[in-house]
Amino acid sequence: MDIEKMRKDYTCGGLRRADLAADAHAQFGRWFDQACEAELLEPNAMTLATAGADGRPTQRTVLLKGYDERGYVFFTNFGSSKAKQIGENPYVSLLFPWLALERQVIICGRAEKIPVAETLKYFVTRPLESQLSAWASAQSGIIASRKLLQMKLAEVK
């Protein structure tokens, strides 16, 4: 396979200023709805880029759980590496790679914690096994063994 010759012609559609909403959040909503209607695999999946005090960037995929004129919401454990990096440097970048639509959206800005009540409201909507896993494991931490993790999970049950 010759990677240098890999190229796709992007012909799905164009981008015309006349077709854009005046408000960026409204435009995001249009495109997000299109991604959902196209039944893309996890249209709310986004790449989150952070950098800590050392300036070294890190990326990972997280799920968008809400958006409005205030911003874009995702959840993470406060002890995770991404939360630690955001605590050191609150500037982040989000990337929605809707490749099947030949579209990507990049959002850059400052991350802030949402109110605890909103976090708890979301947490209780998660499946029980997901809640228990969050309590049993230290996100971004090294797991010594599967058996130890299973023992911790049994403790919280």
Image (cartoon, grey):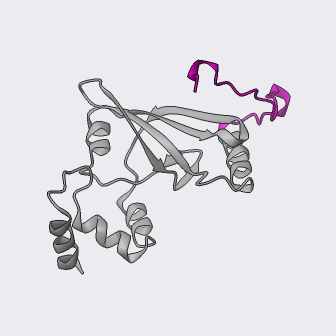
Residue 103 falls in image quadrant? top right
Residue 20, percent from left and from top: 78, 33
Residue furthest front in the image: 1
- Please identify the quadrant where the N terminus is shown: top right
Identify the residue shown where x is 25% and y is 67%. Answer: 135
**101 left or right, relative to 41:** right
Magenta span main SS = loop
- Please identify the quadrant where the C terminus is shown: bottom left
Write down the region rendered in magenta: 1-24
For the residue pair 90 and 57, the one nearer the viewer reads as 57
**80 left or right, relative to 102:** left
43 is higher (above) or lower (below) than 5:
below
Residue furthest right in the image: 18
Identify the residue shown where x is 34% and y is 70%. Answer: 131
Q: Is residue 18 magenta?
A: yes
For the residue pair 69 and 137, the one nearer the viewer reads as 137
Identify the residue shown where x is 40% and y is 52%. Answer: 114
85 is higher (above) or lower (below) than 36:
above
Identify the residue shown where x is 69% and y is 42%. Answer: 100
For the residue pair 127 and 9, the one nearer the viewer reads as 9
Residue 132, percent from left and from top: 30, 72
Residue furthest bottom in the image: 157
Residue 143, percent from left and from top: 19, 56
Total marks in image: 0
Residue 80, percent from left and from top: 27, 49
Q: Is residue 82 magenta?
A: no
